[in-house]
Amino acid sequence: MSFTMDVKNELCNEFPSSRCCVRAHLAGIAGFCGAYINERGKKILRMRTESEIIAQRIVALAAELFDIEPDIEKTGKIYSVDIIENLSRVLTELGFMQNGVVKFLADPFVVHDECCKASFVSGAFLGGGYVKTPKNGYHFEIKTHYRDLSRNLSEIMADIGFEPKSVTRKSEYVSYIKQSDVICDILGLFGATDSMFELCNVKIFNDMKNKVTRRANCDIANINKSVAAAAEQLSAINKIKSKMGLGALPPVLEEMARLRLENPDANLKELGDLVNPPISKSGVNHRLKKIIKFSEEM
C-alpha cells in the first residue's frame, strides 16, 4: 500500500465532529473526485475513487447530512458513488448550485469557519490528493480538473496557514507543497498523526545523514588540503637542500625545514609542539610559507 493510501485510510478513521464540518468535508471530497452528469435522462452527482474505504466514507457522510444511502458500484479498480435522490438539495447545501447553475466551487458559506476550512482541505485530499513516500522525498499535492476550484483551494490553504504553489499539468490544476515541515503540519491538522510521525522520523534521519555527510566531506577536503600543502612544503625544502643546503636558511627556518622532513605526515600543531620552545600553528604556518618563498626566489 502506498503512503498516500496510508494517509487517506488514517483520515477515514475519524469523523468530523460537527455538521458544518461534515458538510465541508463532503464538499471537499465531491469537488475533487466528483462530476455532475446527465446519464440516460438522469442527473447525477458521481464521485469516483480507487479506494473502497473512501467510497464508504462518502456514503456515511451523505447519510449523516441528507439521510440518504447511495449505492457503491465497482467497475474494474474504480468505485463509484452516485447521488440521485434529493440531488438539488445536495448540490445546493454543498455549495455547488446557485440559481439553478451547477459549478464546482468552494462556497464561502460552506468554508466559513477555520474548522470547516480544514475539513474541506482534508476532504479535497481524499478526493484528489497525493503525498510522496517520505523516503523518496517530500511532495504533497491536490489536483482537480476545475480551475476555479483549485484557486479556491489554494486560498483556503493560505487562510489556515499554508502557502501552496500552483501548476497546470495537462488538463489538471495542481496545488502543491514541497517543504517537509509544512507537509508534517498539514498531516497533523488532518489528524493523520501516525503518518505525520513517520514523515517526521524520516526527515530527522535524512537531516542527520546529510549533516554527517557534509561533515565527512568537509573533513576529506581539509585532509586533501593539508596533504597538498605538506607536499608543496616538502618540495620546496628538498629544492633548497639539493641546491644550497638547509644551512642557507635562517636558523629558525632551518629547524622547521628539518622537522618537516623528519615528520612529513605531521599537522601544524604537531610540528609546533616539536619546536623548542613550542610555537603555535600560525607560527608554524608562517615559517613554512617563508621557506616556500625562499625556494621560489632562489
Image (cartoon, rainbow, N blue to C red):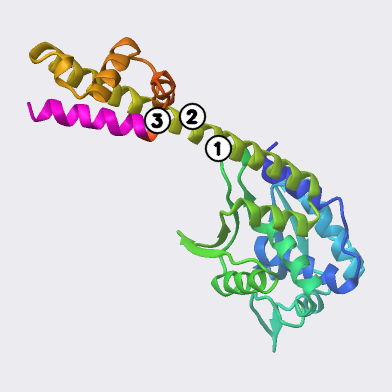
Residue 278 in the image: above or below residue 118? above
Report the residue at 13% width, 13% height from top: 245
**What quarter of the picture does the C terminus occupy?**
top left
Q: Looking at the picture, which amino acid does disc 3 mark? A: Asn
- Asked whether 45 or 173 is in front, the reply is 173
Q: Can you identify the residue that label 1 sits on?
A: 211
Specify start and end residues of the magenta stretch as a single range. Answer: 283-298
**What quarter of the picture does the N terminus occupy?**
top right
- Asked whether 137 or 211 is in front, the reply is 211
Report the residue at 54% width, 71% height from top: 147
Q: Is residue 235 left or right of residue 42?
A: left
> Which mark sits nearer the N-terminus, 2 or 1?
1
> Which mark sits nearer the N-terminus, 1 or 3?
1
- Asked whether 219 or 294 is in front, the reply is 294
Report the residue at 57% width, 69% height from top: 146
Label 2 element class: helix
Q: CA distance from mark 2 to mark 1?
A: 9 Å
Main SS of the magenta part reads helix
- Asked whether 139 or 244 is in front, the reply is 244
Q: CA distance from mark 1 to mark 3?
A: 16 Å
**Does residue 98 show up magenta in the picture?**
no
Q: Can you identify the residue that label 3 sits on?
A: 222
Numbered badge on residue 216: 2
Report the residue at 68% width, 67% height from top: 31
Q: Nearer the viewer, mark 2 or mark 3?
A: 3
Q: Looking at the picture, which amino acid does disc 2 mark? A: Ala
Residue 182 in the image: above or below residue 241? below
Label 3 element class: helix
Outermost bottom residue:
99
